[in-house]
């Protein structure tokens, strides 16, 4: 596994002549809910215009691109790790596990896996053979398949926070998406925590210890 500060789509031809899966995660920082990852293999014959780091896109644009990715991609899969797994493994290892699950769930085996960030887990093909992977710093803004994965993961997790908001409207999850904002801390102080919270995270643990 190698790490690169920047690569272009053309550069990837030096590493692979086959299918490339892009992988990204959303939700390492929130106090509540799953960490969500996605793996996407794009169809080179059906390009998608406007792919970018999901954080740089408006919610409306993400939703439009989400539907287009789901329609045009050769395949995609969402992986996740639960709050209980995050508490047991820590957030880094839980994220790596969720990425492995995303790639394992693809119904087409990629030749190369590209991961946003500075590290990558070990990925296995369906036959148990290891897959070649590279991590790419800021890859979600550089590599189309990683951008697509970031959008799939972001929209998926945001929708799940909207569902959680409907069940627990007093916490404001639809607005802060579980991240540690002032409004979120105030809601926790007033209403406490429930089973979807990551109990190993310091702000949550501090409340439970009290």
Image (spheres, rainbow, N blue to C red):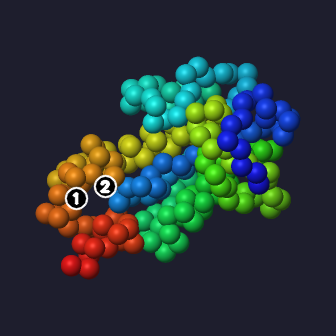
Where disc 1 sits, the SS reads: helix
Point 67% across, 55% down: residue: 120
Residue wearing tag 2: 180
> Where in the figure is residue 189, as x and y percent of width and height?
17, 64
Q: Which mark is residue 185?
A: 1
Marks 1 and 2 close (CB-CB < 8 Å): yes
Q: Quadrant of residue 187?
A: bottom left
> Where in the figure is residue 93, as x and y percent of width and height?
57, 66
The furthest residue to the bottom: 209
| Res. 153 visible in picture | yes
> Where in the figure is residue 113, as x and y percent of width and height?
73, 46
| In-image side of 131 versus 118 (left or right) | right
Instruction: Name the N-terminal-most of marks 1 and 2.
Output: 2
* Mark 2 surroundings: few (<14), some (14-19) or many (≥20) residues within 10 A: some
| Res. 148 visible in picture | no
| In-image side of 48 versus 169 (left or right) | right
Point 53% across, 34% down: residue: 53
> Where in the figure is residue 197, as x and y percent of width and height?
34, 65
Viewer-closest of 55 and 37: 55
């Amino acid at each position: 596994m190698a790490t690169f500060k920047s690569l272009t789509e053309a550069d990837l031809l030096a590493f692979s002549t086959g299918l490339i899966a892009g992988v990204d995660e959303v939700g390492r920082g929130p106090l509540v809910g799953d960490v969500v990852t996605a793996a996407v293999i794009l169809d080179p014959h059906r390009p998608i215009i406007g792919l970018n780091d999901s954080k740089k896109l408006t919610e409306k644009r993400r939703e439009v691109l989400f539907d287009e990715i789901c329609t045009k991609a050769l395949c995609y899969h969402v992986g996740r790790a639960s709050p209980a797994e995050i508490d047991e493994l820590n957030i880094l290892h839980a994220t790596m596990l969720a990425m492995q699950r995303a790639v394992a769930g693809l119904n087409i085996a990629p030749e190369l896996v590209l991961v946003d960030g500075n590290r990558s887990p070990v990925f296995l093909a369906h036959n148990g053979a290891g897959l070649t992977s590279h991590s790419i710093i800021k890859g979600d803004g550089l590599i189309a398949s990683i951008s697509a994965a970031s959008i799939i993961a972001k929209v998926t997790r945001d929708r799940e926070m909207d569902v959680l908001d409907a069940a627990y409207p007093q916490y404001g999850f639809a607005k802060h998406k579980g991240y540690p904002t002032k409004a979120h801390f105030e809601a926790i102080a007033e209403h406490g925590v429930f089973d979807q919270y990551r109990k190993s995270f310091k702000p949550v643990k501090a409340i439970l210890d009290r």
